[in-house]
Image (spheres, helix red, strand yellow):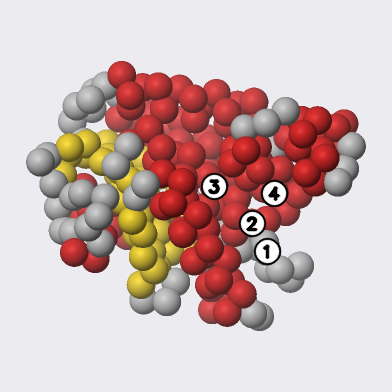
Amino acid sequence: MVQRIAVLTGDLVDSRKASDPKRLFKALDNAIEAITDRYGGQGERYRGDGFQIALPDPATALPAAVLLRAALIRHSEESQRWDARIAVAIGKDRWQPEQRVTEASGEVFVRSGQALDAMSEGSSHLCLELAEDTESECLALLTRFVDDLIDGWSHYAAETVYLSLWYEESQQALAKRLGISQPSVHKRLRAARWSLLDDYLRYLGQRFKDDPR
């Protein structure tokens, strides 16, 4: 059955420079496992620092990409910022959630991989590729702004955003979880431009739900 899905293809940034590559790969593997469990998808790491994730609900694509990058940044070494390039493609495919991504080769998987290849030529770390969408250029531009926003995150900002997305709870609850004060949580979220990011994710999530093309 053909359905609309999301495919995230990515690779780690400067993984060969990591002083503890095993810890870096473990952080990536844990993030992929947590995200696919949460959103009912499948994901695999390949060629060492490359990975691909398929999700049955396109509305979860950008939250998943942000969660993965935030997970890496929050676990970064003091001497190196950990991050990933992620190309998100959305389109129709026959892939099913029980199927491994290494067994899939549809157009949306190819487009996601091609978009990642194109990103390697520049400084972008996040892009959105849509098929047959009249607003694709506008949404791609919005995603570039969000990419730039994430590039400015500190370890603390990434950690707080990750927990905000994962648990969707109040700042008071987050403060208790982090062992800090509520004003400190507010300060971290403001530094991360959380309100703009949250609006962006909610907008795209609703848009992908409303538009089944």
Describe the element under mark 1 as helix, strand or loop.
Answer: loop
Q: Nearer the viewer, mark 3 or mark 1?
A: 3
Which residue is disc 3 drawn over?
Answer: 67
What number of labels is visible?
4
In space, the residues marked 2 and 4 are separated at their CA atoms by 8 Å
Which residue is disc 1 drawn over?
Answer: 76
- State yes or no: discs 2 and 3 in contact (Cβ < 8 Å): no
In space, the residues marked 2 and 3 are separated at their CA atoms by 10 Å
Earlier residue among tags 1 and 4: 1
In space, the residues marked 3 and 1 are separated at their CA atoms by 14 Å
Residue 188: quarter of image: top right
Front-lying residue, 34 or 78: 34
In space, the residues marked 1 and 4 are separated at their CA atoms by 10 Å
Front-lying residue, 21 or 79: 21
x 25%, y 62%: residue? 100
Residue 121 in view (yes/no): no
- State yes or no: discs 1 and 2 in contact (Cβ < 8 Å): yes
Front-lying residue, 161 or 131: 161
Q: Which mark is residue 159?
A: 4
Which residue is disc 2 drawn over?
Answer: 73
x 58%, y 79%: residue? 21
In space, the residues marked 4 and 3 are separated at their CA atoms by 10 Å
Residue 93 in view (yes/no): yes
Where residue 50 sits: x, y (%)?
Answer: 40, 68
Describe the element under mark 2 as helix, strand or loop.
Answer: helix
Q: Is residue 196 left or right of residue 117?
A: right
Residue 73: quarter of image: bottom right
Where residue 198 sits: x, y (%)?
Answer: 57, 28
Q: Nearer the viewer, mark 1 or mark 4?
A: 4
Q: Amino acid at mark 1?
A: Ser
